[in-house]
Image (cartoon, rainbow, N blue to C red):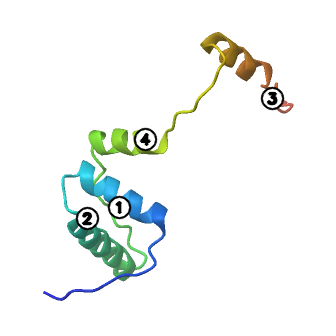
């Protein structure tokens, strides 16, 4: 098998690959090979839609947890909720 070195991978892309690899219980190398295979298949099929298997529930949850964050706030939960509601707008006018 051949080997390649890929340089200058953006940090966010590499973190996504690592998260996918971890949740699918693969090495980062194997995850990259799968992503390359999937991308090539899609590219070579042209107009044919490529149906990839959906990601597992565990993978989706892990990705959501990775994307979500926490923050420090001195306000109480009630104060935060009131602030959110207070900054909402009614939205745009709609005629039905």
Residue at figure coordinates x 51%, y 38% from the top left: 69
Cβ atoms under marks 4 and 1 closer than 8 Å: no
- Upstream in the sequence, badge 2 or badge 1? 1
The quadrant where residue 13 appears? bottom left
C-alpha gap between disc 4 and disc 1: 14 Å
In the image, residue 10 sits, relative to residue 12, either above or below, namely: below
Residue 6, label in figure: none
Alpha carbon of mark 3 to alpha carbon of mark 2: how far?
52 Å
Residue at image coords 25%, 73%: 33
2 to the left or right of 11: left
Dot 1 crowding, Cα within 10 Å, few <14, some 14–19, many 20+: some
Determine which residue is flagged by label 1.
17
Q: Which residue is mark 4?
A: 64
Identify residue for label 2.
28
Give 71 or 87, whichever is nearer the viewer: 71
Closer to the observer: label 4 or label 2? 2
Distance in Å between CA atoms under marks 4 and 2: 19 Å
Image quadrant containing the C terminus = top right
Q: Measuring 72% from the left and 14% from the top, which residue is drawn there? A: 82
User: Could you say where residue 35 lies in the image, as x and y percent from the top left?
Assistant: 31, 69
Q: Is residue 27 left or right of residue 74?
A: left
- Badge 3 is on which residue? 96
Where disc 2 sits, the SS reads helix
């Amino acid at each position: 098998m051949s080997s390649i070195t890929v340089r200058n991978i953006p940090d966010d892309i590499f973190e996504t690959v690592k998260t996918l690899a971890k949740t699918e219980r693969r090495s980062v190398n194997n995850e990259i090979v799968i992503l390359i295979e999937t991308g090539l298949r899609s590219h070579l099929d042209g107009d044919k839609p490529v149906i990839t298997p959906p990601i597992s529930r565990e993978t989706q949850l892990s990705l959501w947890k990775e994307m979500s964050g926490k923050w420090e706030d001195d306000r109480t939960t009630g104060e935060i909720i009131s602030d959110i509601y207070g900054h909402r707008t009614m939205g745009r006018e709609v005629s039905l």
